[in-house]
């Protein structure tokens, strides 16, 4: 089982947020740990799929936000 901290590092590395020293160490680990390497490839595959997803708020959500903005507009003047 992969430890949470290692999984977090994999996510950080997938998004280019892991410092270079830790990234090098993790890449070395990936060479010798098959389970970790499988998890790494899963993260890369899923992150690619997430990049293709386009989300939009529902009409109801937009209406709620706009109504709230309208109701509180006068507070900005204070």
Image (cartoon, grey):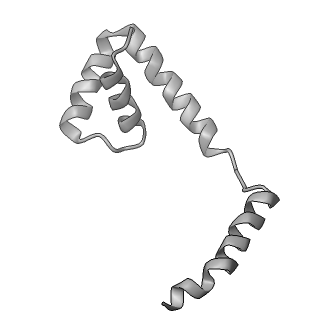
Q: Residue at image x 27%, y 25%?
A: 26
Rendering quarter of residue 51: top right
Which of the two residues, 3 or 20, is positioned nearer the viewer here?
A: 3
Q: Residue at image x 52%, y 91%?
A: 77
**Left or right side of 16 for 72:** right
Q: Give the farthest residue toward the right.
A: 59
| Count of marks, rendered view | 0
**Left or right side of 29 for 8:** right
Q: Residue at image x 78%, y 55%?
A: 58
Which of the two residues, 32 or 35, is positioned nearer the viewer here?
A: 35
**Spot occupied by residue 19 in the image (x, y as percentages of width and height):** 24, 42
Whether 29 is drawn above or below 55: the answer is above
Whether 3 is drawn above or below 14: the answer is above
Which of the two residues, 37 or 4, is positioned nearer the viewer here?
A: 4
**Spot occupied by residue 30 in the image (x, y as percentages of width and height):** 33, 18
Rendering quarter of residue 59: bottom right
**Spot occupied by residue 45 in the image (x, y as percentages of width and height):** 56, 29
Rendering quarter of residue 29: top left
Q: Give the farthest residue toward the bottom.
A: 77
Q: Quadrant of the N terminus?
A: top left
Whether 15 is drawn above or below 55: the answer is above
**Left or right side of 23 for 16:** right
Q: Residue at image x 31%, y 15%?
A: 31
């Amino acid at each position: 089982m992969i430890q949470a901290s290692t999984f977090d590092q994999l996510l950080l590395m997938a998004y280019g947020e892991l410092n270079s020293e830790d990234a090098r160490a993790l890449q070395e680990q990936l060479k010798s740990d098959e389970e970790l390497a499988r998890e790494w490839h899963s993260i890369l595959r899923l992150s690619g799929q997430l990049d293709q997803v386009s989300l939009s708020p529902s009409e109801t959500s937009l209406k709620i936000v706009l109504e709230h903005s309208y109701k509180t507009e006068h507070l900005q003047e204070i």
